[in-house]
Image: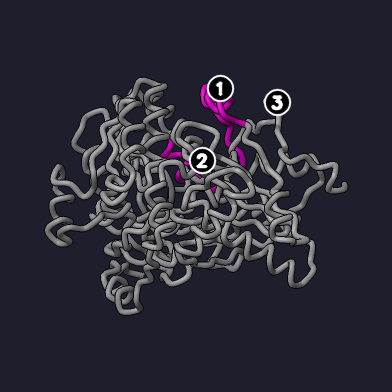
Amino acid sequence: MSNKEIPYKIYLDEKEMPKQWYNLRADMKNKPAPLLNPVTLQPITAEELSEVFCEELVKQELDETTPYIDIPEKILNFYKMYRPAPLTRAYCLEEKLQTPAKIYYKFEGNNTSGSHKLNSAIAQAYYAKDQGLKGVTTETGAGQWGTALSMACSYLDLDCKVYMVKCSYEQKPFRREVMRTYGASVTPSPSMDTEVGRKILEKHPGTGGSLGCAISEAVETAGNLEGYRYVLGSVLNQVLLHQTIIGMEAKVAMDKFDIKPDIIIGCAGGGSNLGGLIAPFMGEKLRGEADYQFIAVEPASCPSLTRGVYAYDYCDTGAVCPLQKMYTLGSNFIPASTHSGGLRYHGMSSILSQLYHDGYMEARAVEQTSVFAAAEQFARVEGILPAPESSHAIKVAIDEALKCKETGEEKTILFGLTGTGYFDMYAYEKFHNGQMQDYIPSDEELQKSFATLPKIPE
């Protein structure tokens, strides 16, 4: 099919929207290692996980064999408010770059949360409500997850308590107020409200916090309140499962016009949007049906895949959550206060970590000044102001398109544009004023953090 026959935006109708999530683990020969109980260091049971998470979500977390899981009708109806999301051909960017590459992006910013996070927020809130709970607790970095969860909880009449990473809480007051508009309570983390928060502040006075800190506080709060459970916006298997709606839609849209991507790119913090985007394509690769190049893009300030170690580690700074085998910088690693709050997590999804370890995907770390330069270039020609997190994928998509310009190859590139940057103007201001700095941890810093990794018996 010729380029002229492919529209700028490919929309699916409601009938074409996927009715199931895809469980990538079902097609993985090497399954992710089991979660471990933080006290016994033995594989955690469903019963133990149910003390923290909703029962149905625990089933999804542990399911390694069911390839497709039906999406409940109430969730599908909620999805229809903003889905299917468009797949866009970046013709203007291609022309600006003078590249023979064909560039597509899956845009997930068509909802008030401004990101892909709502895909899992409504699912987790639904299962909490279905279980008869009063409310949920969570953490948020840049604020997209907290916003999405507050929206979902408001829709289902659930209480929502959010611990927001302190540097983001201060940098993004408007994101905080959107959460409060939807009825959530928002606390900067680490705080003096929890035992773990007080310990972190004692050890790291004046810290801007991290997702690992906020997770610990949210888990402790959920455990102290009857009728509450903790929910997480990334990293966990269940979250990647819900986010596969992104990749499933993208594949249906591409198949509709006989488009096959050569390179698929996503930003990577905990791994939910990247995992969601690549899932059906990776499934084909694992089954030997097709081949793709997958690139995870992470910040140079928090390089878990490119500079981390593959080991069991705590999912949170307070060491109260289960241990997960993943690429990690160490749960005690607190990254610099960069402007991509959603990517400031010390570890990576166990699914993506296993796939990376097995050589099915690659990873690149990029510095934030180059990321914002790419974001500005994209905004000027494509008309969307991207979130700092998504702009990591834009940066590498542009890099790959320019490689095609040098070689003359007509590769097809797909990347995830997972959010808008309208609450990130403080960051854009720093970039425009020349006040933005690049933070790269030293080998000594990382080694110091690696030394604190838990010792797990064989």
Figure check: 188 above or below 28: above
Q: Is residue 14 rendered magenta in the image?
A: no
Figure check: 201 above or below 217: below
Q: Which residue is mark 2?
A: 116
Q: Disc 2 to disc 3, how far (Cα)?
A: 21 Å
Q: Which residues are magenta?
A: 55-83
Q: Disc 1 to disc 2, how far (Cα)?
A: 17 Å
Residue lying at 41% horizontally and 40% vertically, measured from the top left: 58
For residue 333, say whether it is visible.
Answer: yes
Q: Amino acid at mark 2?
A: His
Q: Amino acid at mark 1?
A: Asn
Image quarter of residue 76: top right
Q: Nearer the viewer, residue 176 or 385?
A: 385
For residue 215, say whether it is visible.
Answer: no
Residue lying at 85% horizontally and 44% vertically, measured from the top left: 4
Q: Which residue is mark 1?
A: 77
Q: Is residue 62 rendered magenta in the image?
A: yes
Where residue 232 sits in the image (x, y, percent)? 38, 43
Q: Amino acid at mark 3?
A: Lys
